Image (tube, grey):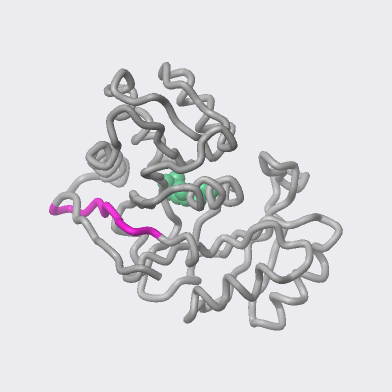
Amino acid sequence: MPSQDELKTMVGQAALHYVVPGEIVGVGTGSTVNKFIDALAGIKDSIRGAVSSSQASTERLRAAGIAVFDSNAVETLSVYVDGADEIDAHGYMIKGGGAALTREKIVAAQSRRFVCIADESKLVHTLGAFALPVEIIPMAGARIMRQFAALGGTARVRMAGDQPLLTDNGQQVLDVSGLRIDDPLAFESRVNQWPGVVTVGVFAHQKAQVCLLGTAAGVTTMEFDAA
Ligand code: 5RP
């Protein structure tokens, strides 16, 4: 039985299949994506570079000798490769465990195809067991927490030591437990309308088209219909 780390390495390498030679690739954030970046380093001369979804991924890409472009300098990316905290059978995801959800959604939105790479522990029937990350403007925090409470959730400010964690955008993250997200498209649209929400970690409008799932039997490819 491969370890979780080995499963992440397998899917990170498998994602190279979706990288288009000569183009710029969208790169997500997290421990699984780090395996993809390591694999990408081996073919770096065949791509132009990357658009990155976080300072952490930017540093790792540059250390591997891969050029990092500003997202504004690139109109469309053919592929975006990123991990997930949960993914369901439609390609809807919860993301943001690494606090990079806003930039992840931005790069996903400029990409024609989202390839999710994940180990099999991330595949769920219904989203919500993983506490939902939500990036917020701090002055709206108390009200947004009450709005989640009205939906049956319990929101906590994510901490880094004894201070609220700050994202690459200088904002805070709430982690909301106790939700069951039966309709991810409607849920994402609803929470997006709450003033002070920067990004909700439900990726339904920017869902995956493909998931490479690391299993004990190897890499399983899941393909999803349009949203
Ligand atoms: C970061 C993310 C990550 O993709 C998600 O948390 C999965 O991370 P990992 O591959 O480390 O399990 O959304 O904001």
Q: Find residue 170 and report its image quarter.
A: top right
User: In terms of depth relative to the viewer, which is nearer, 48 or 201?
Assistant: 48
Residue 189 location, quadrant: bottom right
The boundaries of the magenta stretch are: 208-217
Q: Which quadrant of the rendered structure holds the C terminus? A: bottom left
Residue drawn at x 65%, y 82% is 151
Residue 78 in percent (x, y) is at: 37, 43
The quadrant in which residue 211 appears is bottom left
Residue extending farthest to the left is 217
Is residue 118 in the magenta section? no
Taking depth in this image into account, of 146 and 168 the one nearest to the observer is 168
Magenta span: chief secondary structure: strand
Q: Give the farthest residue toward the front.
A: 75
> Could you tell whether 73 is left or right of 206 in the image?
right
- Please indicate whether residue 64 sits to the left or right of residue 46 in the image: right
Could you tell me residue 138's position as x and y percent? 81, 55
Vertical order, 174 against 172 (above or below):
below
Total marks placed: 0
